[in-house]
Image (cartoon, grey):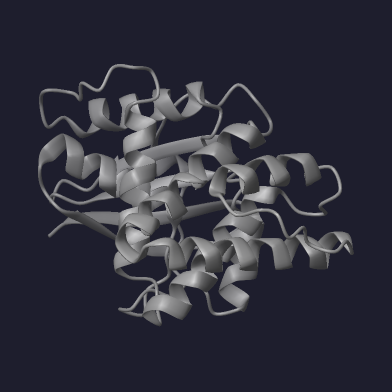
Amino acid sequence: MKEYKITDFKMFEKAPYEKPDFKAVIELHMRGPKERERLYGPAFTAEFIKYTLQAVAKQTGEEPPEDIKTLDQLKEYLISKSEKLPTPPYYIIIWAQYVTDKKFEGSLAAGTRIMYKGLTQKIAESNGDTRLPKNVDIYQILFKLRQLAVDMKIAPIEFGYKDNGDGTIYVINGGCYFFEGCQMSLEHGLLKQSNGRISCGVVTIICQYLKMATNIEWDYDLLKFDKQNCIAKCFTL
């Protein structure tokens, strides 16, 4: 594997917290099943709730409640059980979405793209100002996205990028609180996209935001998947 040096990247200021606001992360990721419900209908929501409750029951040893029928009810239930769970509740949300995606599509495909489009839109609208940088300056675009994510307390601790001068960029995320959840999902074969590449939610949001700002489709390859930091190459299509 190629070695990447942190000095190769233009790093943004570190996030001023050690851990994210777990309620904000839950709120953000509950946007995912809401977006999928528009595509698949209530059947997706019912399956998603079932898998989520099964995961909570397995981790807590408690019988799952039978009266949870809506995503808002599920959100409140997850928050109420957060202290009893050995893993952050947003791990369960993401895992359950991937499992349900596999059931409906066989791989991470259309539903996952719709999910991250919805998540990115929620971040973009988080401060009430939906204006994007008016130029195609990559730094300004990434700077605004970083500001929004930090203000929401959902951003990885460290973030930077490297402009390769050929229309592609490298992005680096350090201290990402999703890593262990991604690792577990990868071990269970849940992170593979239909094209065989590994999915990264953080970089998917970056590409979706770049698309919103530039009106050009962006995609990525994950080059490094490591607890210390993850690195991806983003490129236009």
Q: Is residue 25 left or right of residue 121?
A: right
Question: Does the rendering let one see residue 2?
Answer: no
Q: Position of residue 95 (x, y in %)?
A: 58, 64
Q: Answer with the quarter of the image where residue 198 lies.
A: bottom left
Please determine whether, in this image, residue 235 is positioned above or below residue 111.
Answer: above
Residue sitting at x 86%, y 59%: 60
Question: How many numbered markers are drawn?
Answer: 0
Give whichever of 177, 55 is nearer the camera: 55
Q: Quadrant of the C terminus?
A: bottom left
Q: Which of the 4 image quarters holds residue 49?
A: bottom right
In the rendered image, residue 50, in percent from the top left (x then y), is placed at: 63, 67
Closer-to-camera residue (55/225): 55
* x 31%, y 37%: residue: 121
Residue lying at 73% horizontally and 60% vertically, measured from the top left: 66
Query: Can you give x and y, in whole percent of width and height, for residue 194 in the image?
Result: 33, 78
Q: Is residue 61 visible?
A: yes
What x and y, as percent, mark residue 126? 40, 24
In front of the other: 129 or 34: 34
Residue 211, located in which quarter of the rendered image?
top left
Residue at far front of view = 67
Where 77 falls versus 104 (above or below)?
above
